[in-house]
Every structure is written in C-alpha cells, then in structure tokens.
Image (cartoon, rainbow, N blue to C red):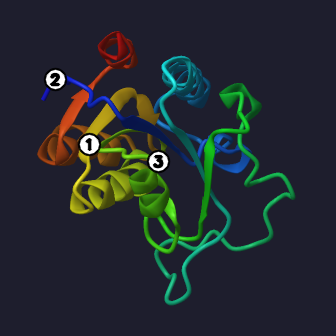
Amino acid sequence: MTATTLDPTTALVLVDLQKGITALPVAHPAAEIVARSARLAAAFRAKGLPVVLVNVTGGAPGRTEGGSQGGNPPADWADLVPELDAQPDDIRVTKKVWGAFHGTNLDLELRRLGVTQVVVAGIATSIGVESTARAAYEHGYHVTVATDAVTDMNEEAHENSVARIFPRLGETDTTDAIIKLLG
C-alpha cells in the first residue's frame, strides 16, 4: 500500500547498515541502499524527528545450523557506515538477534519520545528489516517501509517481504515519496 501519511512523531529506524553487512553480496547495490537511507536520515533530522541507528554484534544463543557464519569478523564489522552521518542525538541500538526490538530498549526509547509510527529501511529485507517491522507492528506502531532503501542477500526473499509481508504490516513507498510526506 502506498504511503499516505506520516504521524507527527515518526521515527526512522535504519537496520544493520554497518560495514560487515553492507560488504555482503546483496540483490541491489548496497551503496544505493545506504545513499537512500542517508537521505532519509538527513530529512528526518531536518524535521527534528528521531533517527534510530541499529547494528548487530552477534547472534542469539541456541541452535544455529541454518544461519551461523562462523569465524571471527573483522574488528570494524559492526561499525555503522560513515555515510549515515551519525549524530549525537541519534538513538543507537545494538542487537544480537534479527529484530531491533527484542532484548533492547528501543520500544522504551520510542515511547518516551511519543513516537507512534516508524519508517524502516536497511539490510537484510527478509531478516533484520522484516523482523523489526513485524515487532514494530506488534508493539502497536504504524509501520512504513522504504522499499527502495532495503535489500537482501536473496532476491526471492527480498521480493517476498516487499510484496507479501510489508503490505500486511502497514504502508510501503519509495524514499522520495516518504521524504515528500515529511513536508
């Protein structure tokens, strides 16, 4: 569903735009996803709206037969990409699971600010982005996904999330359309 409105207190949540994730092979060029996400962040900051920068530093405990990458990542693997121009007022969330809400203080931070809606973007569409969007929906936030500011390691998984999952959670639209809604 095309984005129709943004609540007065909407937060931008950028998921896993960090050096290690953006270096992975993805369906759509990571540099383009980062550039669109950076444009969204600048637009939200210009309106005085919260920007949440999420990174992942590990995995949840338990069985990992299907997803463990193994090995030791480089020291800067979890560092946010500099193109996001992280600001001191940005909310930082470090997670160890797919979604940005579980096991973090994200919901508390957003509620303290009176946030009622989130715009979500980042990598990977079917993993961190979808998990975060689902949890936001389950927490009662209005959800919008910037569909041209997400990508995945698997094109089919990306397309499934964009075509089948995100429209059930809220609205979807392009970076340009969302920035236009900011006014």
In the image, what residue type sits under mark 3? Ala
| Distance from Cα at disc 2 to Cα at disc 3 | 21 Å
Residue 164: x and y in percent read 15, 45
Circle 3 sits in a helix, a strand or a loop, which is it? Answer: loop
Q: Is residue 100 visible?
A: no
In the image, what residue type sits under mark 2? Thr
In the image, what residue type sits under mark 1? Val
52 vs 155, nearest the viewer: 52
174 vs 22, nearest the viewer: 174
| Distance from Cα at disc 3 to Cα at disc 1 | 17 Å
Q: Residue at x 67, y 45 (%)?
A: 18
Q: Residue at x 49, y 88 (%)?
A: 63
Sequence order check, earlier mark of 3 and 1: 3
Q: State whether residue 2 is above or below residue 94.
A: above
Residue 148: x and y in percent read 38, 24
| Distance from Cα at disc 2 to Cα at disc 1 | 12 Å
Residue that label 3 marks:
124
Q: Quadrant of the C terminus?
A: top left
Residue 73 left/right relative to 117: right
Q: Quadrant of the N terminus?
A: top left
Residue that label 2 marks:
2
Sequence order check, earlier mark of 2 and 1: 2
Q: State whether residue 166 is above or below residue 85.
A: below
- Which label is found at residue 160? none
Q: Residue at x 48, y 19 (%)?
A: 47
Circle 1 sits in a helix, a strand or a loop, which is it? Answer: strand
Residue that label 1 marks:
143
* Circle 3/circle 1 CB separation < 8 Å: no
Q: Residue furthest right?
A: 75
90 vs 67, nearest the viewer: 90
